[in-house]
C-alpha cells in the first residue's frame, strides 16, 4: 500500500543501501601506513577527536556523491519516472535507483511483494509456472520451463515499463547484487541475462514512515529456468533446492498456503494466508518445518517511575552486592521500544508477546494490540506475599505461570535485540528441542565462590551445585546474552525438582548470593541432561555500553547487520543525567530500527514523516549514505 507524501520527501530517501566506500584520502592513508602505525596514530586521539577527523576526511567524497545523486534525481523527475507519494530515489552501490514507497515495510512484506509481482505477471501472460521451495527464507523462487522463457521475459519487460523493478544475479554480496542490478523493463537487460538460468527480479521498497528503511535485492523473487529432461517427461532444476531436482511436466499444479515456502511466516500468525501455485513435490511439509507456536516474553521496569521508587524504598534490607541494586539495572533508554521493533521486523513468526511488569506500562505501548498482553507480577507469583520484588532472578522463576503462554517461547531482556531476519529454527528444532548458546566466559572455579562474586556468577555457582548433585556433571561456562529459548514444561519441572531453592529465590526482593538463575543456565543444562535441549551456535555481539570508545563497534554493527542478535548491556552504576553514552546509544538505535512497530501508538503518516531524519553528532557518525541499509547482506537466512 502506498501513501501520499509531500514532494520534499524524495530528498529524505536519498541515501545508499550500503555503507559507501572509503574516500580516496582514507584509502590512501590505509594503503601507505601499516596497521601497527595506524593503531599508534589512533591511540593519540580520543574517540571524539578521531571521529571528527574521520568525518572531515569523508566529507568531500560524501558531498560529491550527494551532488551527483541530486542531478540524476532531477533528470528522473523530468522524465516522469519519479512520482510524488509513490516513488522515491535511493542510492545503492550501483547508483541511483527508484524505490516504491510503502507503509510498514518488513522483510516478509518485501519478499511477498516481489513474489506476488512475478506471479501476477506470469499469470496474466499465461506462462505456466510453479513456486519452488528454495533454500532461503528471505527470497522466493518460481520455476518455469525453458520453452516458456521468451514469453516470460516479454511479460516481465512489459511489467517493468509500469513498475520500477530490477533484475540481477543471485550470487555474491548485497553490494555486488546492487551493482549488477538493471531495469527489468529493458530488453537489453534481459539480453545480457540470456545465459543465466536463475534471475532475480525485485523492487526497492522504502518505508513511508521511516526515512532510511529501504529493502532491496535480498528479498527478490528468483526466476528459475527448468530444462526438459532427455526423455522429455520431466523438468530438471537449474540449481539445488530443499525438496527435489525434477518434476513431472504433465503433473497438475496444486494450490498451497504461501507461508509454506518461507520460515519467516507461521501458521499461527497468518491464519488466512494467500495461496500459491506449485507442484506436489513442493507442497508437502518437510521434517525440519516447525509447526508449534512460539511466543516471546519480556521483563521490563521503569526505574524512573516515582511509584516504583516508593515501593522499592519500602523494602527492608540491603542487597549483598552493589551490582544487585545499582542504578544501571533500572535505567531505561527506551530499549524495549527498539527491541519490539526488532522483533516485529525480524521475527514475524512470533505468535504473541507477553510483557511482564510491576504495575507499569510504557506510555508509548499500544496495549490494545491483539498480539500483546501486559502481565503484572501479581498475576504470576505463586506467593503474592513476596511482592514487590526487584530481583530479576525471582521474576524469571515465575514466567511459566503466564496464562496462555506457549510451551515454546523466547525470553528477552529489553537490552537484547534481533539484528537480521531470523527463523524459529535458530532457537528450536522441529521435534521441540530448544537450543542454548554457551559463552566462552567461565564461572568462578569450584570452591572459590564468595560474597564478592557478582550476582550472575554467584547464581551460576548455585546452579552448578544443583546440577552436579542431580546429574554428576560440573558446569563451567556461562551463556551468551541472546534471546533464551525456553520450554514452559521444563520450567514447571524445575520448580518441582528444586523446590526449596526455587522458593527461596522467588522470595528474595533483591538478588542474593544463593539465588538460582533459571533462564540463564539452569533451564538449558537441566533440559540438556533430560534430553530436551541441545547446544547451538548463533552469530551475536555483546557490547558493554558503559565502556568508552564504543562508537566504532556500534558503527560496524550498524553497517554490517550480520548478527542474528546483539546485546547492549550496561554493567556499572551510572547516573542517567551524566551518562555520556545515552545519546550515543539512542542515535544507534534510531538508525538501526527507524520504523515504528505495531506495538507502539501509531501516529498518522503525516506526523511520522514530519520527524527529522536522524542527525547524529558527537562520537557516533551515521552518514546519510548509510542510513537506509538492507538488513540482508552476504548471507541468506535459511
Image (spheres, rainbow, N blue to C red):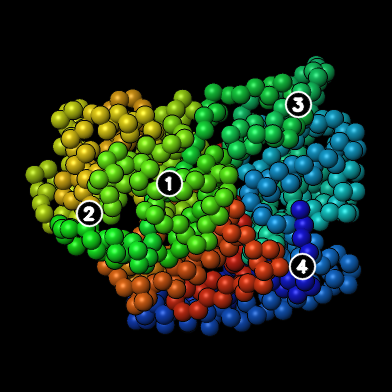
Q: Quadrant of residue 115?
A: top right
Q: Label 2 near label 4: C-beta < 8 Å?
A: no
In this rendering, position of residue 463 left or right of residue 26: left
Q: CA distance from mark 3 to mark 2?
A: 56 Å
Q: Residues within 10 Å of mark 4 (few under 14, many from 20)?
A: some
Residue 255's disc is: 3
Note whether 16 is above or below 616 in the view shown.
above
Q: Position of residue 522 (x, y in %)?
A: 27, 38
In this rendering, position of residue 69 left or right of residue 151: left
Question: Is label 3 or label 4 in front?
Answer: 4
- For label 4, the residue is 5
- For label 1, the residue is 375
Q: CA distance from mark 1 to mark 3?
A: 40 Å
Q: CA distance from mark 3 to mark 4?
A: 38 Å
Question: Is label 4 or label 2 in front?
Answer: 2
In this rendering, position of residue 156 left or right of residue 503: right
- For label 2, the residue is 510
Q: Residues within 10 Å of mark 1 (few under 14, many from 20)?
A: many
Q: Secondary structure at mark 2?
A: loop
What residue appears at the point 89 percent right and 54 percent down from the top-left corner? 161
Q: Quadrant of residue 436?
A: top left
Amino acid at each position: 500500500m502506498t501513501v501520499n507524501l509531500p514532494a520534499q520527501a524524495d530528498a529524505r530517501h536519498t541515501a545508499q543501501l550500503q555503507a559507501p566506500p572509503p574516500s580516496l584520502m582514507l584509502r590512501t592513508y590505509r594503503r601507505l601506513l601499516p596497521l601497527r602505525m595506524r593503531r599508534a596514530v589512533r591511540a593519540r586521539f580520543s574517540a571524539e577527536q578521531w571521529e571528527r577527523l574521520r568525518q572531515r576526511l569523508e566529507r568531500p567524497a560524501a558531498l560529491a556523491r550527494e551532488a551527483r545523486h541530486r542531478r540524476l534525481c532531477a533528470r528522473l523527475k523530468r522524465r516522469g519516472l519519479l512520482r510524488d507519494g509513490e516513488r522515491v530515489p535511493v542510492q545503492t552501490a550501483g547508483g541511483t535507483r527508484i524505490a516504491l514507497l510503502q507503509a510498514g515495510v518488513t522483510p516478509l512484506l518485501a519478499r511477498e511483494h516481489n513474489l506476488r509481482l512475478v506471479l501476477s505477471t506470469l499469470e496474466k501472460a499465461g506462462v505456466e509456472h510453479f513456486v519452488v521451495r528454495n533454500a532461503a527464507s528471505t527470497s522466493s523462487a518460481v520455476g518455469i520451463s525453458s520453452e516458456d522463457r521468451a514469453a516470460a521475459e516479454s511479460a516481465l519487460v512489459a511489467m517493468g515499463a509500469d513498475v520500477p523493478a530490477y533484475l540481477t544475479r543471485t550470487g555474491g554480496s548485497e553490494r555486488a547484487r546492487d551493482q549488477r542490478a538493471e531495469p527489468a523493463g529493458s530488453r537489453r537487460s534481459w539480453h545480457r541475462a540470456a545465459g543465466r538460468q536463475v534471475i532475480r527480479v525485485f523492487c526497492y521498497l522504502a518505508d513511508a514512515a521511516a526515512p532510511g528503511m529501504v529493502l532491496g535485492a535480498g528479498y527478490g523473487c528468483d526466476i528459475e529456468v527448468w530444462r526438459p529432461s532427455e526423455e522429455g517427461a520431466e523438468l530438471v532444476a537449474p540449481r539445488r533446492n530443499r525438496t527435489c531436482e525434477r518434476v513431472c511436466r504433465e503433473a497438475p499444479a496444486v494450490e498451497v498456503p504461501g507461508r509454506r515456502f518461507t520460515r519467516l511466516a507461521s501458521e499461527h500468525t497468518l491464519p488466512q494466508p494467500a495461496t500459491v501455485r506449485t507442484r506436489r513435490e513442493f507442497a508437502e511439509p518437510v521434517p525440519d518445518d516447525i509447526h508449534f507456536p512460539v511466543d516471546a516474553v519480556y521483563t521490563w521496569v521503569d526505574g524512573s517511575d516515582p511509584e516504583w521508587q516508593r515501593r522499592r524504598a519500602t523494602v527492608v534490607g540491603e542487597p549483598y552486592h552493589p551490582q544487585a541494586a545499582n542504578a544501571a539495572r533500572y535505567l531505561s533508554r527506551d530499549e524495549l521500544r527498539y527491541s519490539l521493533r526488532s522483533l516485529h521486523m525480524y521475527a514475524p513468526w512470533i505468535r504473541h508477546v507477553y510483557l511482564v511488569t510491576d504495575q507499569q506500562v510504557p506510555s508509548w505501548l499500544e496495549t490494545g494490540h491483539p498480539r500483546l498482553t501486559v502481565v503484572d507480577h501479581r498475576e504470576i507469583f505463586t506467593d503474592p506475599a513476596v511482592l514487590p520484588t526487584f530481583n530479576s532472578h525471582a521474576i524469571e522463576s515465575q514466567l511459566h505461570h503466564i496464562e496462555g503462554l506457549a510451551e515454546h517461547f523466547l525470553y528477552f531482556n529489553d537490552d537484547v535485540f534481533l539484528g537480521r531476519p531470523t527463523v524459529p529454527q535458530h532457537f528450536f528444532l522441529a521435534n521441540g528441542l530448544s537450543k542454548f548458546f554457551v559463552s566462552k566466559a567461565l564461572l568462578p572455579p569450584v570452591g572459590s565462590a564468595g560474597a564478592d562474586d557478582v550476582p550472575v556468577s554467584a547464581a551460576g555457582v548455585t546452579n552448578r551445585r544443583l546440577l552436579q548433585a542431580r546429574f554428576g556433571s560440573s558446569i563451567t561456562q556461562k551463556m551468551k546474552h541472546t534471546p533464551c529459548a525456553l520450554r514452559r514444561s521444563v520450567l514447571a519441572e524445575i520448580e518441582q525438582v528444586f523446590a526449596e531453592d526455587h522458593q527461596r529465590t522467588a522470595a528474595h526482593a533483591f538478588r542474593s548470593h544463593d539465588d538460582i538463575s533459571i533462564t540463564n543456565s539452569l533451564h538449558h543444562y537441566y533440559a540438556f541432561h533430560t534430553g530436551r535441549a541441545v547446544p547451538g551456535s548463533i552469530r551475536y555481539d555483546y557490547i558493554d555500553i558503559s565502556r568508552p570508545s564504543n562508537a566504532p563497534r556500534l558503527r560496524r554493527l550498524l553497517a554490517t547487520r550480520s548478527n542474528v542478535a546483539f546485546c547492549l548491556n550496561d554493567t556499572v552504576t551510572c547516573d542517567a543525567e551524566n551518562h555520556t553514552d545515552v545519546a550515543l546509544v539512542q542515535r544507534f538505535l534510531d538508525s538501526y530500527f527507524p520504523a515504528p512497530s505495531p506495538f507502539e501508538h501509531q501516529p498518522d503518516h503525516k506526523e511520522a514523516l514530519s520527524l527529522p531524519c536522524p542527525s547524529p553528532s558527537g562520537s557516533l557518525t551515521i552518514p546519510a549514505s548509510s542510513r537506509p541499509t538492507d538488513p540482508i547482506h552476504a548471507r541468506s537466512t535459511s
